[in-house]
Image (spheres, grey):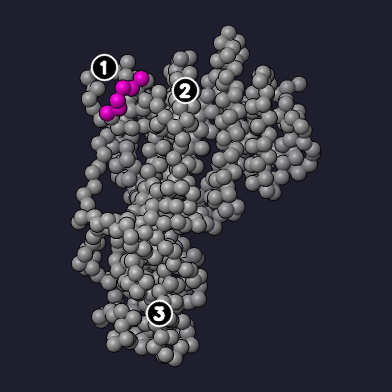
Amino acid sequence: MARPLLDTALHHEGDILLFGFLTRHGGSDADPLANHETAERFARSLPLDDPLKTLKALSTALSTLTGKSDPDVEQLGVLLTLDLRTERLCEELLHNSVERGLRSWPPENTVWQGLLELASAFGRAYAHFLRQPREKPTNKVWLESVPRVLIQFFRHWQVENLLSVFRYEQLAPARWRELHEAYLFGRTLQLSKTPSSVGLDKRKRAADGTMDREYLQILLLQLMNNGEFTPREVFWARRRIAGWSTEVSLVSADADDGKRSGDERFVVDLSSGEGLRRPPIESPKALFYLDLSPVIASIDEEIDSLGDSAAIDGSTPDVQPVLRSLLPKLKILFSSRPVRMEWRGEREASELITAHVVPGLSTIIRTLHDEWERVQAVRHLPGPFVEEITITDVGGCWRETADGASNDPRAITLPATAGDASAEHAWRIKNRSESGTLLRGRVDDPYRVIPGSLIAFRGRSDGQWTIAVVRRLKRIMRSNVEIGVEHMGCNPQGVTIAADPENGCSAQGSTEKRDRFSALFLRGSAQHPKVPIKTLLLPAREFEPGRRMVLLSTSMNYTLRLKEPLEPQADFVWTAFEIIARQPRGSRVAAR
């Protein structure tokens, strides 16, 4: 006996293992999704211990559904059931890849590709079944299936859209036309008027789902595909957008009262191959308006509540920095009038200038150390017994290590764990101003230069290093990218920091903090950014406002207290500090 279209027993409870319906036993069928029985045998054959193989097998099995010109309703039930039972696996893989980043296993790029293929396979299958009610409009059974099929079709379209934003790739116009066509089909059946559940908060209403809400989430998320957001920010924005989609609605140009035809609401032309845009749009054929002012109000409310973690749904200490950075950017993005940025100084085109770029805090420290060693070798100085970068005292005048006349023998140690040596990659400086630089180059892994990443670059092999943070990433083709960076300072110097034994960090997160680690020191600057104080660039996991730590040198150790961050990011924090004590080199910290 065939199972019902959606068996409630298939929902996962908290005590059931992830994707627990799969086992390592059983065989496979030539047509694994022909009916519920063959689908169960197929499910039992999937490799539970290999999620990537499971994703691949599911994608291959779904392709058998689209090969049938006249599918039956039972196969639609199989599709919906399989979709329901794989949802948690996909969400867990997605969450793990974003939150753990480079530490995720399987690697994030591999997971995203597998999830993209599966979402595309589900989307093609649902599109195939949507053709049945369009070709057989008198068939009541097929017509009754349209609301659920459309919602699931849009949800998998959301995953494709989400992964395209993660990968900094634009969707093809043909894909947008396919989406708009499906939405228009639903509107002809008046499915967008489906009432939502009453008495639920906006998050639960969003989970309930309607065609309009699912479609709106796709449109809002795609606005974030401008190269300014990290995958983690996009992932967290997706959760907020699900709730915000209950507060806004699309209004067709025909239904508009005409009084706001000249305003600056967002619009979408369903006859085009694009998503949301700001007007004017020439000769629209199927124009819909979207007023996002309720979303702006919700963002303002959440920004005001950031100080109270209990007031933020799902907020944890590690999420707070993400939201503090994300919400103001979303407010600008969703505002009816775009914010015009004022450039600090004139841009100067530099097409023929080659730049050397080093991404990542640990790699920058290692590069500076290797450079210092080469300078010492040229001077024929005896090599130290420990790895060192020469600096002067924190309270005194900081000098360039490459300047032989100002070489100071006092030095601090650089642990071998600071990072692996990395060759500098050749880039082109497209243009630059006092505040930032536009760079173009080829990278093996674009995710090393996503927005919020730290880089060091210089225009000549013997020139000074500039420290900058990536603000925008544009993928040109494959490994070729263009990044816009904002300058933070010049002439960085490597330092070693030790935990203060008398007053360490707070218990919160202290288990992840190390006794010693490497950091970068930046001098005050009268140019952009105008920071007239000394600052440090630390690994993010080592930062905590008010934390006391010791900067080591060969003659004197300096106890510092960290201040509020100037630039908090996922991998590093740029912060000011104050010197609260000085200890001779023979102190207890140095001897440890």
Q: Is residue 32 above or below residue 306?
A: above
Q: Is residue 301 visible?
A: no
Quadrant of res 80: top right
Quadrant of res 367: bottom left
| Tag nearer the camera, 2 or 1 | 2
Q: Is residue 256 above or below residue 319?
A: above
Q: Magenta region: which residues?
A: 280-285
The numbered disc on residue 12 is none
Residue located at (36% from left, 64% from top): 355
Q: Is residue 90 above or below residue 280?
A: below
The numbered disc on residue 181 is 2
Q: CA distance from mark 2 to mark 1?
A: 25 Å
**Which residue is tagged 3?**
372
Number of on-image labels: 3
426 or 537: nearer the viewer:
426
The amino acid type of the residue labelled 1 equals Asp
Q: Is residue 135 visible?
A: yes
Mark sitting earlier along the chain (3/1) = 1
| Tag nearer the camera, 3 or 1 | 3
